[in-house]
Image (cartoon, rainbow, N blue to C red):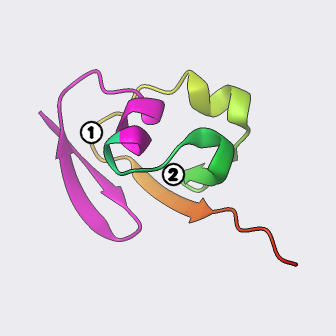
Amino acid sequence: MITVRANGEDCTVPFGTSLPDFLKSRGQALPRVVVERNGAALSPLEAKGVILANGDKLEIVRIVAGG
């Protein structure tokens, strides 16, 4: 198990968890969020290939369309 911090909350996840799987476990999906990992914004393509590491700091922002 490893610990990551997502939006200020510590989360324990299994070693080898991908970012897309982590988001899915939280009811979110890459096409609907923007993710910053350890201070660097990730493109959707980059985010798809990320395997979380112990101590990662994530900021996850939900994309909302206005009208």
Residue at 67% over, 42% down? 31
Between the C-alphas of marks 1 and 2, the distance is 11 Å
Judging by the rendered image, the residue that carries numbered circle 1 is 54
At numbered mark 2, what does the secondary structure look like: helix, strand or loop?
loop
- Location of mark 2 (residue): 38
Q: Quick one: label 1, few (<14), some, or many (20+) residues within 10 Å?
A: some
Task: Say which quarter of the image contains residue 66.
Answer: bottom right
Task: Give the percent coordinates (x, y) of residue 38.
Answer: 51, 51
Quadrant containing the C terminus is bottom right
Q: 24 or 43: nearer the eye? A: 24
Q: Is residue 3 above or below residue 7?
A: above
Which residue is rendered at x = 28% and y = 67% of the image? 9
Q: Position of residue 2 (x, y in %)?
A: 18, 38
Return the disc, 1 or 2, that comes first in the chain's sequence.
2
Q: Which residue is drawn at the image coordinates 46% and 55% (left, top)?
A: 58
Nearer to us in this view, 10 or 20: 20
Magenta span covers which residues?
1-24
Q: Indicate the quadrant where residue 6 lies.
A: bottom left
Q: Is residue 35 left or right of residue 67?
A: left
Position of residue 56 in the picture relative to residue 60 (left or right): left
Residue 19, position as x, y percentages in the image: 45, 34
Label 1, secondary structure: give it: loop
Does the magenta run of residues contain 12? yes
Q: Are marks 1 and 2 in contact (CB under 8 Å)?
A: no
The outermost residue toward the left is: 1
How many circles with numbers are drawn on the protein?
2
User: Which residue type does callout 1 highlight?
Assistant: Asn
